Image: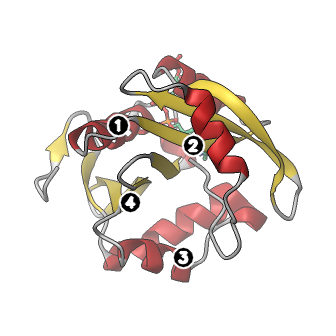
């Protein structure tokens, strides 16, 4: 997007800025409850512009969705994606996911990974529709509920996705926000 808003339907997509975090947190608390990120987590994500790409969906002055990508040289991840309850099912999530995937392609990423709650079938269906494949499960990843995370990968360059799943098992998550991408 490069700072230029893209518009189709009612919602406008644009990069997330620090002053959006309060509005984002209102949705975050409502949608993720006990497992929601903190303001500090969003700020620390926005403080890493080289490897992070966050956007919001806006209708008028109201934030109705947000999403973020973490992009390292060899792998990228959907860190989070969410749409306000009464706007779900209107295409905003799909549009935001498209922008994140386009950004991963622009950065020449070989794949986009994500973790999604095992019981979140709505989100898993969307990811399947976009071509993500399940590559593994992380037991008890979401706390405090202890819900499993399903690992999914969108292969952008023909790399064996199981390599990514193996790498994830060795990652030390201490201090990292549990992604709800
Ligand atoms: C997952 C989420 C981001 C998707 O965003 P969205 O704007 O609702 O998605 P879209 O409108 O682009 O459509 C997604 C599809 O799911 C369906 N859908 C969306 N919300 C739905 C709901 N609440 N119940 C049933 N179906 C739903 C749509 O009809 C559409 O189906 P299709 O692909 O067969 O046409 C959004 O539902 C959300 O914020 N959920 C709560 C937070 C969350 O789970 N985030 C993802 C964590 S991994």
Residue linked to disc 4: 63
Q: Is mark 2 within 8 Å of ligand 1?
A: yes
Distance from Cα at disc 2 to Cα at disc 1: 12 Å
x, y (%) of residue 79? 51, 54
Q: Which mark is residue 101?
A: 1
Q: Sequence-wise, which precedes: disc 4 or disc 3?
A: 3
Q: Sequence-wise, which precedes: disc 2 or disc 1?
A: 1
Dot 2 falls on a residue whose secondary structure is: strand
Residue 7 image-quadrant placement? top left
Label 4–label 1 contact, CB within 8 A: no
Dot 4 falls on a residue whose secondary structure is: strand
Residue in front for this viewpoint, 77 or 75: 75
Q: Residue at x 25, y 33 (%)?
A: 9
Q: Sequence-wise, which precedes: disc 4 or disc 1?
A: 4
Left or right of 83? Residue 31 is right
Bin the neighbour count of mark 2 within 10 Å (Cα to Cα): few under 14, some 14-19, many 20 and up.
many
Q: Residue furthest bottom?
A: 40
Q: Which mark is residue 90?
A: none
Q: Sequence-wise, which precedes: disc 3 or disc 2?
A: 3
Residue linked to disc 2: 114
x, y (%) of residue 168? 65, 48
Label 3–label 2 contact, CB within 8 A: no
């Amino acid at each position: 997007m490069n700072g230029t808003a893209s518009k189709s339907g009612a919602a406008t997509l644009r990069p997330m800025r620090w002053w959006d975090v309060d509005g984002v947190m209102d949705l975050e608390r409502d949608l993720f409850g006990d497992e929601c990120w903190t303001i500090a987590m969003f700020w620390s994500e926005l403080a890493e512009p080289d490897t992070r790409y966050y956007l919001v969906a806006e209708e008028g002055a109201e934030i109705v969705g947000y999403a973020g990508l973490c992009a390292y040289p060899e792998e990228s991840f959907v860190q989070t994606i969410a749409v306000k309850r009464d706007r779900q099912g209107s295409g905003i999530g799909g549009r935001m996911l498209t922008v994140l995937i386009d950004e991963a392609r622009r950065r020449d990423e070989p794949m986009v990974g994500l973790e999604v709650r095992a019981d979140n079938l709505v989100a898993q269906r969307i990811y399947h529709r976009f071509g993500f494949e399940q590559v593994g499960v992380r037991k008890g990843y979401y706390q405090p509920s202890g819900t499993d995370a399903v690992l999914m990968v969108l292969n952008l360059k023909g790399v064996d996705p199981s390599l990514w799943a193996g790498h994830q098992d060795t990652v030390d998550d201490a201090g990292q926000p549990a992604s709800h991408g």
